[in-house]
Image (spheres, grey):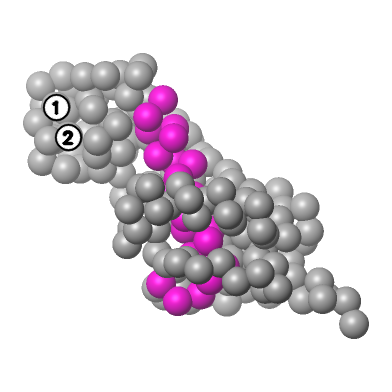
């Protein structure tokens, strides 16, 4: 029997709630012959642990992919649609197309594959946990790049999320081109 007959992809996103930067999604097809210890929701892991696991996931998985949607597209189609599009693109970029897609949360992109939506799946479904880790580590790298382009906003620290520090910097400097203009705190500053 072919061990790859059932190709199960886990999918998750990172950056949906941020005020700046792209939204990322990852899709991962784990090779269940290799157990990866420590998989969990990326938010529960330290940056160092995420990086370690990211390398192992990329090495030990049958296949994986990452996709992102930029700020302009987020503002144009809204964050939910942008997130679903990033998920769909990540799935379609997989080298092996899945028979089943496990999506973290209660909404999923329209796909021609069987899809199961699993709320909090990133905490207990290994393939979704792996996708959560890849999406988060890849987005964090991009936010570090944006920090070098826009050092005044300290994207390296808060990763674009609406922390108190970010809100103060946003008020002091106004939004940059990587801020999501359709999000209330940013929109409110523009309309002042």
Instruction: Look at 78% across and 59% down and name the residue there.
Output: 96
* Picture coordinates of residue 33, whole percent (x, y): 70, 73
Magenta segment? 123-145
Marker disc for residue 169: 1
Q: Nearer the viewer, residue 4 or 101?
A: 4
Q: Position of residue 61 (x, y in %)?
A: 67, 59
Residue highlighted by disc 2: 166
In the foreground, 119 or 37: 37
Residue 95 percent across, percent down from the top left: 77, 52
Residue at horizontal 88 percent and vertical 76 percent from the top:
2
In the figure, is residue 151 to the left or right of 40?
A: left
Residue at 46%, 47% in the rendered image? 51
Q: Quadrant of residue 192?
A: top left
Side (left or right) of 7 relative to 166: right
Residue 120, placed above or below residue 150: below
- Secondary element under disc 2, as helix, strand or loop, is helix
Does residue 131 show up magenta in the picture? Answer: yes
Work out how far the residue at label 2 is from the one at label 1, CA to CA, in angstroms: 5 Å
């Amino acid at each position: 029997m072919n061990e790859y007959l059932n190709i199960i992809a886990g999918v998750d996103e990172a950056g949906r709630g941020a005020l700046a930067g792209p939204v990322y999604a990852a899709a991962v097809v784990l090779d269940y012959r290799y157990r990866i210890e420590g998989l969990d929701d990326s938010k529960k892991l330290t940056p160092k642990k995420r990086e370690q696991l990211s390398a192992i996931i990329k090495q030990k998985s049958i296949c994986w992919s990452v996709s992102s949607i930029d700020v302009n597209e987020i503002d144009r189609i809204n964050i939910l649609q942008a997130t679903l599009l990033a998920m769909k693109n990540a799935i379609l970029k997989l080298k092996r197309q899945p028979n089943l897609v496990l999506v973290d949360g209660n909404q999923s992109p329209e796909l021609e594959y069987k899809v199961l939506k699993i709320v909090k799946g990133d905490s207990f479904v290994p393939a979704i946990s792996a996708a959560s880790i890849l999406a988060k580590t890849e987005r964090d790298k991009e936010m570090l790049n944006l920090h070098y382009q826009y050092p005044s906003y300290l994207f390296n620290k808060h990763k674009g999320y609406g922390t108190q520090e970010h809100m103060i910097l946003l008020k002091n400097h106004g939004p940059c081109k990587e801020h999501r203009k359709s999000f209330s705190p940013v929109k409110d500053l523009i309309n002042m």
